Each structure stands twice: as C-alpha cells, then as structure tokens.
Image (tube, rainbow, N blue to C red):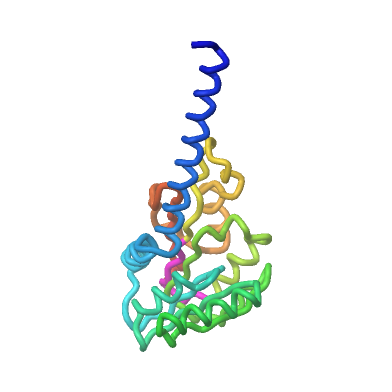
Amino acid sequence: MTLRRVLFRASLALAGLAVGLAGASYAAAWWFQRGPGLEHEADRLTRVADVRPGMTLAEIGAGSGRLAARMARRVGESGRVYATEISPFLIERIGQVAAARGVTNVSRILAGDRDTGLPPACCEVIYMRRVYHHLKDPPAINSGLYAALRPGGRLVVIDFLTPGWLPLRRHGVDPSAVKSQVSAAGFRFDRALDRWSLLDYCLVFRKPDR
C-alpha cells in the first residue's frame, strides 16, 4: 500500500471520528439542555439546595427558562421562581416556555450587568448555571445576591470544569476564584461537587443566619 493511500485512509478515519464526536456532543447537549438530562439536573439541584414546596427561588441568567420552569414545578403553586436575564428577547422566551409547560409561578426580571434586579431578602435559594464566567462585575452581582437571599439561604453556582483539552475551556472560571469572590461578599462556603456533570462543577454557599 502506498504512503498516499495510507494517508488518505487515515484522513478518512479522522474525519469519521470528528463527525462521530460532533454527533455525540450534540446528543449530549440535547440530553442536558432539553431532554431527560435537564430533568435529572433539576432533581439534583432540588436535593443539593434542599428545595421544598412553598419556597422562593431565583435563577440568575435563566436563558430560555427551561430549568426555571422545572424548578417552578418543584416549589409548587405556593412557591415562586424569579428568572432573571439581561436580554429582553430571553425575558419573552422565558414566559413562552413557562406557559408551554403550564407553570404560572415564574416571575421574569430584566437584570443588568451589575444589578440582579432581585428584591431584597426575596429568596431562600439562588442558583446560576454556566453563568458566573459571563459576569462582567462579579463583586457587584455577588453583593446583590447576598442582599436578595434571606438569612440562612443557599447560593448554588454551577460552571464549567474547563479541562485544558476542551475548546470551551476559555468560557469557564476556576472554582477557587468563584469561592474567593463569593466569600468576599459575605457568604460562607458550604461544599463542592467537583463532578456535577462531565463538564461542570458545583459550589454551594450559605448566607449566615442572623
């Protein structure tokens, strides 16, 4: 077999592998973003944050609202979920997703780069998923989160592990930086779940009781 043919076959094999990996990545993304994976993540978040019916939660950077709608079901009609976004388009989308899922206890809040938009002492639990690394002014946002949580409330931060071999590594944030910045706002670090998913870690903080 000539060298040219060997190289040609190797290039075909590499192309096939790339297509396979892309397909697997798409399937995994669908599983976590829209399919059973997101439902599973909502269950885990409920356990980790000790979410119960009647509670008030807030999701920072709720995107399309798919996770917020699932958490709204878990707090029930007597509870509430504030879903914040900085995009008016996504604020509209959150409402559409909530309506499609038949939940009426999701309140949409248009936030800013340095303002959560949340009322003071409104929540027992605040969470953000793959959002922290987007914050332009973490100290200002962390201060707002502290004010929005009731004493003893929990803050859950989920973000990318960003291993060096992944192209998306620049989109994450080191967990040690998150711990330092959030603790500087007055929170107490509770625990870490290093393998929240294949790509994410999870940090849990508490606002001290009075």
Viewer-proximal residue among 86 and 20:
20
Q: Give yes or no for residue 153 being in the magenta stretch.
A: yes
Asked if residue 114 lies left or right of residue 148, the reply is right
Looking at the image, residue 122 lies above or below residue 156? below
Q: Give yes or no for residue 146 being in the magenta stretch.
A: no
Looking at the image, residue 176 lies above or below residue 87? above
Q: Residue at point 43% right, 72% down? A: 125
Q: Residue at point 43% right, 76% down? A: 69
Looking at the image, residue 36 lies above or below residue 28? below
Q: Position of residue 49 (x, y in %)?
A: 37, 66
Q: Quadrant of the C terminus?
A: bottom left
Overall secondary structure of the magenta section = strand
Q: Quadrant of residue 202?
A: bottom left
Viewer-proximal residue among 67 and 176:
67
Q: Position of residue 43 (x, y in %)?
A: 32, 66
Q: Residue at point 54% right, 53% down? A: 178
Q: Residue at point 52% right, 58% down? A: 130
**Which residue sits furthest top?**
2
Residue range corresponding to the magenta coloring: 148-156
Viewer-proximal residue among 180 and 63:
63
Q: Position of residue 94 (x, y in %)?
A: 53, 77
Q: Quadrant of residue 91?
A: bottom right
Q: Position of residue 185 (x, y in %)?
A: 57, 63
Looking at the image, residue 99 lies above or below residue 184? below
The mark total stands at: 0
